[in-house]
Image (spheres, rainbow, N blue to C red):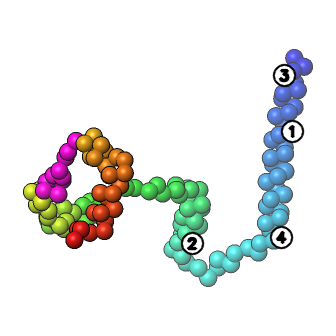
């Protein structure tokens, strides 16, 4: 019983506070903002002003989302710019230099020999003498 009386009293006080706040707000606005002079305006102009105010209020309520980066291929960009009627393809391989396969195979074929023979031939003083003579040039 006591609890329900306390809840009822609290509700009344909250309602009284809201009424007081509204009255104080209206008093403050009456002091600070002069009343609008609408005597010279037609009914249509008043409606236009009212609708403009509503539009401005609605603009403030909605927050614009942050835009996300969208990855679009070059073909899609060209298609959107030129339209779907034009055939668009960016084949990047057409700009590349053509290389014959045979030429690359010739370069790769190097004389493959047994490396152990080469090491044995160049080991010791005789191998060093051969290297020295080869660098110097052919002997007279």
Name the residue that disc number 3 marks.
4
Q: Tell me which numbered mark, 3 or 4, is placed earlier along the sequence.
A: 3
Q: Residue at x 17, y 57 (%)?
A: 107
In the picture, measured across the screen, residue 68 lies left or right of residue 110, that is right
Q: Is residue 16 above or below residue 89?
A: above
Q: Position of residue 98 (x, y in %)?
A: 14, 64
Q: Nearer the viewer, residue 36 or 110?
A: 110
Element type at mark 1: helix
Based on the displayed image, in which of its 4 quarters is residue 72 positioned?
A: bottom left
Q: CA distance from mark 3 to mark 4?
A: 41 Å
Residue matched to label 1: 13
Q: Residues within 10 Å of mark 3 (few under 14, many from 20)?
A: few
Tell me: residue 120, above or below residue 110.
Answer: above
Q: Which mark is residue 124?
A: none
N-term-proximal mark, 1 vs 3: 3
- Residue at the spot of label 2: 49
Q: Total marks drawn?
A: 4
Looking at marks 1 and 4 on the same chain, the residue that comes earlier in the sequence is marked by: 1
Q: Depth check: give the residue in front, 124 or 35.
A: 124
Q: Which residues are magenta?
A: 105-115
Marks 3 and 2, how far apart at CA: 48 Å
Which residue appears at 51% of the width and 74% of the height?
A: 44
Question: CA separation, marks 1 and 3?
Answer: 14 Å
For the residues marked 2 and 4, what is the alpha-carbon distance in whole angstroms? 23 Å
Q: Which residue is mark 4?
A: 31
């Amino acid at each position: 019983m006591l609890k329900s009386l306390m809840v009822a009293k609290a509700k009344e006080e909250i309602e009284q506070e809201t009424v007081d706040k509204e009255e104080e707000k209206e008093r403050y606005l009456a002091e600070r903002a002069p009343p609008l002079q609408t005597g010279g305006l037609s009914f249509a102009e008043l409606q236009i002003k009212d609708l403009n105010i509503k539009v401005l209020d609605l603009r403030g309520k909605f927050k614009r989302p942050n835009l996300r980066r969208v990855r679009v291929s070059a073909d899609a960009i060209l298609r959107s710019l030129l339209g779907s009627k034009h055939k668009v393809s960016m084949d990047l391989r057409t700009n590349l230099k053509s290389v014959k396969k045979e030429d690359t195979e010739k370069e790769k074929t190097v004389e493959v020999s047994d490396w152990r023979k080469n090491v044995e031939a160049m080991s010791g003083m005789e191998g060093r003498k051969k290297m020295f003579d080869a660098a110097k040039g052919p002997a007279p």
